[in-house]
Amino acid sequence: MHRISQSFLKDFSDYKSDFVDVCGLQIKAKYFEGVEFPSSEAMDLGNYFEYKCTGSLPRNGKVPQPKFSYKGTAREKLSAPFQRAEDSAMYFKDVVKEYGIEIIDVGVSLKNEQMNGIADIYAKWNDRYCFIDLKYSGLIDNKWDERGWETNSLTEKHKLMIQGVQYTLLAKDCLNHEPEDFDFYYFVFSQSNPKQAKIIKQVIDESTLELHKNNVAFVYNQINSNPLDKIFKAKPSLKNCSKCPLFDDCEYATKLPLIETVYY
């Protein structure tokens, strides 16, 4: 049986939407067939930052490798973006020390009957247990982008907030922490300034937890009651196909722009 991760839930929602161009074959390959997709530089920086913070490896199990400037010469040094990521990780450690946060475990694997996830940090802070999720973002103060972390707009950014909801439910089922006695924090660090960061505590309403459970149950039943080939269909496009690792063996892949019809 296939459990539902919060990242899959977001991608599946996009796939079902008429407004986001997501190919079902890519989702199936990524989540059910173990195909590793190329990472962006932002993802590489995020993985390197988290590794330097906690020592945890990314999902592929490989140690994140930084990029260097003047490689192979006497002037070799970390490239500026990776140096900032390393400096941000050092600042994270300062924050943990100054706040007196007790880190109990990192990279904590969680699962119940229908959900799974990996918590970055399981900790005790001010005599309360909590999860801390690390974010390394170029949009730390962005209000308008759906990935932006401007605080006042976060209540409308469900793709960001869904993680805290799912992990709070998993904390109850896996660690016996009742939601009212457990905290969830996002520690968001800036890609442009190693000394800029936010600590965001997510307070979750009971009705939100119940709604999420129902949504997970619906998707879980869909995924496990039907053949995956019937659920995930190809949505070829020139943009997506050109960078897809499935391209060479995919019968639906296109090298040409497809004809799109508009009714007016």
Image (cartoon, grey):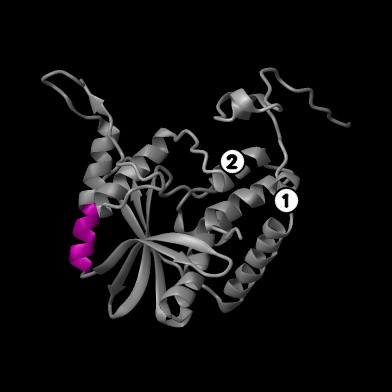
Looking at the image, residue 145 sits to the left or right of residue 174; the answer is right
For label 2, the residue is 29
Q: Quadrant of residue 151?
A: bottom left
Q: Residues within 10 Å of mark 2 (few under 14, many from 20)?
A: some
Whether 227 is among the magenta residues is no
Callout 2–callout 1 Cβ contact below 8 Å? no
Identify the mark nearer the N-term, 2 or 1. Answer: 2
For label 1, the residue is 227
| Quadrant position of the C terminus in the picture | top right
Q: Can the viewer see residue 22 in this picture?
A: no
Label 2 element class: helix
Q: Which residues are magenta?
A: 91-99
Looking at numbered disc 2 in the image, what kind of residue is underneath it? Answer: Ala
| Quadrant position of the N terminus in the picture | bottom right
Where is 75 relative to 227, above or below? above
Q: Nearer the viewer, mark 2 or mark 1?
A: 1
Looking at the image, residue 3 sits to the left or right of residue 182; the answer is right
Label 1 element class: loop
Residue 25 in the image: state x and y as whole percent. 65, 39
